[in-house]
Image: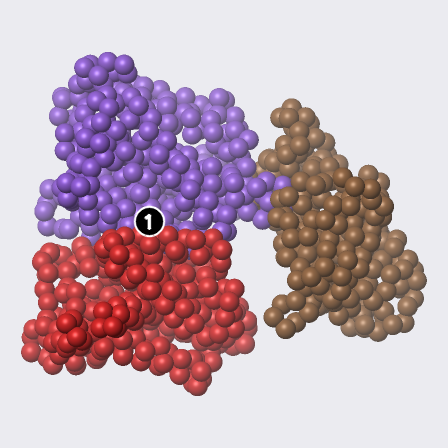
Amino acid sequence: MSDWTNILETRGLTMQFGGVTAVDEVDFTLRDGELRCLLGPNGAGKSTFFKCLTGQLIPTRGSVTFKGEDMTGWNTHDIVNLGIGIKTQMPNVFDGVSVYENVRLSSRRKHMAAQAKELAEKTLERCGITHLAKREVGTLSHGQRQLVELAMVLAAEPALILLDEPAAGMTGEERDRLARLVLESARSAAVIVVEHDMVFIRQIAKFVTVFNRGAIFREAMIDEIMADREVQEIYLGKQANVASA
Amino acid sequence: MDYTLVVALEMIRAIAWLVLLASGLAIIFGMMRIINFAHGEFLMLGGYTVVISTNAGVNEWVSILILAPVVVGVFGIIVERLVIQRLYGRILDSLLATWGLSMLMMGGVTMIFGNTVQGVSTPFGGMKIGAYQVPIYNFVLIGFAVLVLVAIWCVLKFTKAGLIARATMQNADMAEALGIRTRWVYMTTFGIGSAITGLAGGLLAPVTGVVPTMGMNLVGQSFITVITGGASVIAGTLSSATLLGTISQGVTFLTGPVYGDAALLVTALVLLRLLPQGITGRIFKRSL
Amino acid sequence: MEKSVLRDPGFYVMVAIGLAAMLILPVVLDMFTIMQITQYVVLAVFALSLGYIWGFGGILSFGQAAFFGLGAYTFAVAAINIGETTIPLILAFAIPCLFGAALGYFIFYGRLSDVYLGVVTMVVTLLFWKLANHTAGPEYAIGEARLGGFNGIPSIPVMNIPGEPEAMLDPVQMFQVFMGFLIVVYIVLRLLIASDFGRVSIGIRENETRASLLGYDVRRHKLVVFAIGSGIAGLAGAMWATYQAFIDPNAFSMEMSAKALVWVMAGGVGTLVGPIIGVILLQWLTLKLGTMELLNSLAVLGAIMMVLVLALPKGIVPTLRKLIVDGWTLARRKKTGGKADE
């Protein structure tokens, strides 16, 4: 692997659907160990951008580089095997099997059976879902399934964690736990969080990238962003919701 | 020169044949994303309708153009109400159920009419191109293939029903959100697809004769044409029928009909490896 | 499903029942009945091949008969040419397995959807059936073996003891050997399903996207599952060929594929016992209905298939299992005097 300074970089990343440009020439960089939140109104292109990073979409133009390696257009599983953990917008879990088995399938990827077992148990503990270990995932609530999926991501011990709306459908208590987990994970890995929930964002965010109309609109510290009039304008409708949330 | 003409004609006939076989199936697939595995037996039903009514004294053209589509269309609607609509959202189950229906129909027709080939005379006889005898009925088949495609195109393009159909094809959830009653649309689609299949079966009857198992010889070609074409009814059916018809007929000329079928399958497999959504999944995406 | 096979009492019960049947049935039943049961044993192996790939890999193949027939023809041709049956038996596993892998490459690496998978596997079966029917002429021969078209291949050698071509098995021995095969296939599949490989397959069945998000190569995984299933179907085909001493293109028929689906559906997708029970139940039913001579067997099969899809989508074994578990919980609750909170 070549020398690298930024753990993740995109250059001129563009995604078009038919005539619509959802992501437009995005240059994005993330330093190792950094925790970054991606904000923006609905349709700003955050999720499309995210899917270009995870290999779920193949960008029309531009490149994605992880640790100096160009991974544009790779298969999802190859991207994951570079050391990237991904949580998609809708919880993607194995519904028909137990919580423990879900997490173990993740930890088993890199470890022998015995260590995988240990790591899976430790991760369940860490995520506070040990009491659910034997439950079938399909029978859990949306928020609980989100936590299971996060546990699966963490059990793979990734160097970069990509989370798309992890707090959706969570109770207040679950969200607080999630915030603690994300902050804790950010000590050992770089993290990108795409999120709408401003309460959650305030709990975790430091440096923030705001998307609008498929491009990066502003990048700054969270306090600065919150005070920015233009950001408030593009967010307008949203902001009202936030106040009430 | 004559030979070239005859070969070219055969190629076009092969393409028309595939268009006729597959159009009804393609409409159902394009709209509902399911494959009617009893398609071959729907063709058979159209064929039997023609043979039985013609032998009972009905004018042959009335049997082919009116009775066969109506009988099979109505049958399709009944099947949709009794079976398919219970399985929406369970695509694989609907495949299994229609396959069960296929065997039930095959067995049922065998019980009623026996396992022998019955036929009607082929209208028009033949004509000569140089030293070669060509059945005039081939031109009828080609003409009807064109007619079916043009009719579908006109309906999709110029009518309100066509607009609804196009919306549903593009995005079923969105269509539902816009207040279109997709259930009603599906029933109609299945009925129309079945009627076209009935017409095709009726048109084929004079050529192939009818026998309860005739569907088995036809479904392979129909299925391959539809999935190779992808979800767009006209562009998909036409492009894949042209490609596959040319290749299979070419191979048939060289080695005989069995390998023609094999060539069809191999071409389709290679094509699907390259274009998993069928031809119209990648190319002609926006077409009908 | 997730606990270790070796700690599952059901596993030992099944193996014990199998072994008991293998040893005791020849003593208590007459030769004719034993030969009848042998047929069920062969078909049970065939049913397991589909039960495995469908229930534990999420691959619904509409063309399992293609591999069954390929195995049968491979065995027939090889046995006639070689004059013994051990190597042909291995080939009857290996060749369908390789063919399954090749076909799987197109299907899974093309990322074809379920509907396309169904259509492609069905069309492949149809094609084999047509080709096999077409080989009537004397020019269609592989070595000593004439393929015979719709007339089929007669006089396929009976199975012999490995290394001793003269030592052919009598019907009772054949029954016992086939039971042995069935038990081995069952054990191997159970272990495979419980292994990490098998657990990933189940994960893929549950959610392909998540499996690839964990870094598993879904395409390769499905290809391997499909190839193993194809090999087992081929083995069943070889058993069928040597049991009947005859094989014809109907081995490739759609009816054969449909039967496999019906057995698995009836018994229950996602179990291995289910497909075996499905075979016994439905073959017995077909036998009874067949003697009435009133109904066409194909029509009956079709009707059963439709009824299963519409009325009993989960199959017999899972439905029973749920009933028993529910009953058990209910009984326990009553016993402990728990609150009737439902």
On the question of residue A151 being in view, the answer is no
Of C73 and A160, the residue lying toward us: C73
Say if B150 sits above or below B255 in the image.
below
Report which colour depicts chain B.
Answer: red
* Residue under the image location 26 percent in, 70 percent down: B4
Residue C221 x %, y %: 51, 39
Q: Position of residue C197 (x, y in %)?
A: 53, 33
Where is the N terminus of chain A found, in terms of image quarters?
Answer: top right
| Image quarter hosting the C terminus of chain A | bottom right
Q: Residue at x 13, y 21 (%)?
A: C30
Left or right of C35? Residue A107 is: right
The kind of residue tagged 1 is Val
What residue sits 64% from the left and 37% below the top? A106
Whole-percent x and y of residue A138? 56, 46
- Above or below residue B254? Residue C224 is above
* Chain in brown colour: A
Describe the element under mark 1 as helix, strand or loop.
helix
Q: Image quarter for residue B146?
A: bottom left
Q: What crowding class fits label 1: few (fewer than 14 Cα within 10 Å), some (14-19), or many (20 or more)? A: many
The residue closer to the viewer here, C216 or A233, is C216
Q: Which one is nearer the viewer's eye here, C295 or C112?
A: C112
Residue at point 47%, 29% (across, down): C192
Colour of chain C as rendered: purple
Q: Does residue B258 appear to the left or right of C62 in the view shown?
A: left
Farthest-out residue, bottom: B158
Determine whether C179 is above or below C109 in the image: above
Whether residue C151 is visible, yes or no, is yes
Q: Chain of mark 1?
A: C
Q: Is residue B137 left or right of residue B58?
A: right
Residue at image mark 1: C124
Question: From the viewer's perspective, is B32 left or right of B108?
Answer: right
